[in-house]
Amino acid sequence: MILSSFAQDKEEKIACVIGDRLTSDVIVRLRTPEGRDDWLYCHSENLVKNCKYFADRLSENWPTCQILDSRNCVDIYCQELDFDYHVNLIRLLYTVIDGSVDDLWHGVRNALGILQVAVELGCPQIITACVNYLEAVTWEEAEEEEILRIVPRMGLQAEPILARLQPVKQSAIINIFVSAIRFATSSPSPNMNDLKSSAQEQLEYMLTEDDDAPLLTADDNIKVEVKECVNRLFARFIDSVTGFFSGTTESLSEEGNFQLFQSYLTDLSWACQILSKLEIMREFVEYWSDASEKIVKVLEQGSSTTEVIEIKLRAVEVTSKVLEAIGYGTVILPTAKRLQVLKVWLPFVRVTKPLIDSVTTNCENAMLLKLDGEMWQSLESTFVSIILALPSGDQAEILTEWLDNEYMQYPDLTEAFEVWCYRSKVAKRRLSLVGDEHAMTNSF
């Protein structure tokens, strides 16, 4: 008897199929402003069970329920773009949504459209299922923008969808920043270079102010952590440099040495950008200045292969950032140190620039050696700024060496030469006027 009753119920369930005119007791007319008017032959039992709108519309309490045929035909007006979503929702009212079947939604856009209709018509079971689906699956960028446009208007019931887009606690941001900076400066094996580059890119993005404020405002603890990470990276680089002097490392041209040296310099160039954003360049500038002579000697030992020239280029990149910090007063160094840095790097850059230019013109791997033209221009301006801040006698020494050098085209120190000539010519008169004013002041 029980089995017979179950079989009868099952037959009744199967009989309720959308579009079956023989068993349908209500017509849903989907109409659009463009004149579309589609009739769906439905069953009130299915519509009423999981949809508040249909439950109200087909109840005896509906104002027009006594009008002939009003309970047998329900009009729903919608936009053409939402038409398919309405059809899909009505079909879902015939489906058992219990979590056992996941492939009901056919993509994020379709689920989002159905969710909108479900909220509008009051279908709590479908709303929950849509929300669970959208919260769990990945989104394309365009889909994410669409979700941001639509979901916030749906209230608390749709909030779980936006969980991945909510602002993160500052403590979580700090934790991920610290982990990332440690990895990005750890000099991992070459097969992890892509991961390292990605981490470096995201760290820089976190600290960049664009249309939005930086993700992280670094406090003293963060700055200390960054400095320690960069110092450890620099220490490994210097150990590598020292190896060339002690004899433990043979040639810069060897593949292993080349890759390691290049990796260190690339990472240090990136680290300079982070230090600059955090305004903590001083230590690195001092360390690089002190080690400059050793670094240049190692670089000069290398051959003229494309690989070694690329390493020299990376060294110039780091040096340009160090010199910029010195030249524009971000880091204040004594005169002797500024002069020493100039005497080491000015001749090196002067010889290296034509070498890089010749390789980029003739080499198949020229793209590897491309350097932003603005960087060369900026480096030239930095040299001029540093020179003009030195005592006039030191300026004269550097300019004399420049005028006697065959590689005087770059860096072009013409501006420094012109300023030096003017200052030197008027020096006695200007200083004598200052002396006269001082004497007159004292006489009073």
Image (cartoon, rainbow, N blue to C red):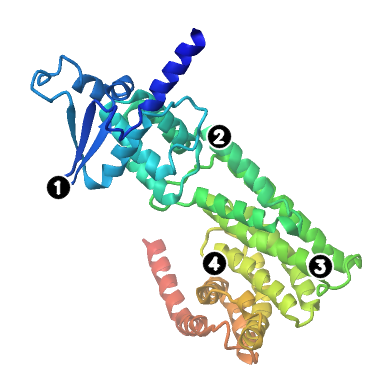
Instruction: Say which residue label 2 marks.
Output: 172
The nearer-to-camera label among 1 and 3 is 1
Disc 1 to disc 3: CB gap under 8 Å = no
Instruction: Say which residue label 3 marks.
Output: 257
Look at label 2 and name its amino acid. Ala
Q: CA distance from mark 4 to mark 2?
A: 37 Å
Look at label 1 and name its amino acid. Gly
Helix, strand or loop under label 4:
helix
The nearer-to-camera label among 2 and 1 is 1
Q: Residue furthest top?
A: 1
Q: Position of residue 257 (x, y in %)?
A: 81, 67
Instruction: Say which residue label 1 marks.
Output: 35
Look at label 3 and name its amino acid. Asn
Instruction: Say which residue label 4 marks.
Output: 327
Q: Looking at the image, which is closer to me, 95 or 115?
A: 95
Helix, strand or loop under label 1:
loop
Q: Position of residue 398 (x, y in %)?
A: 62, 81
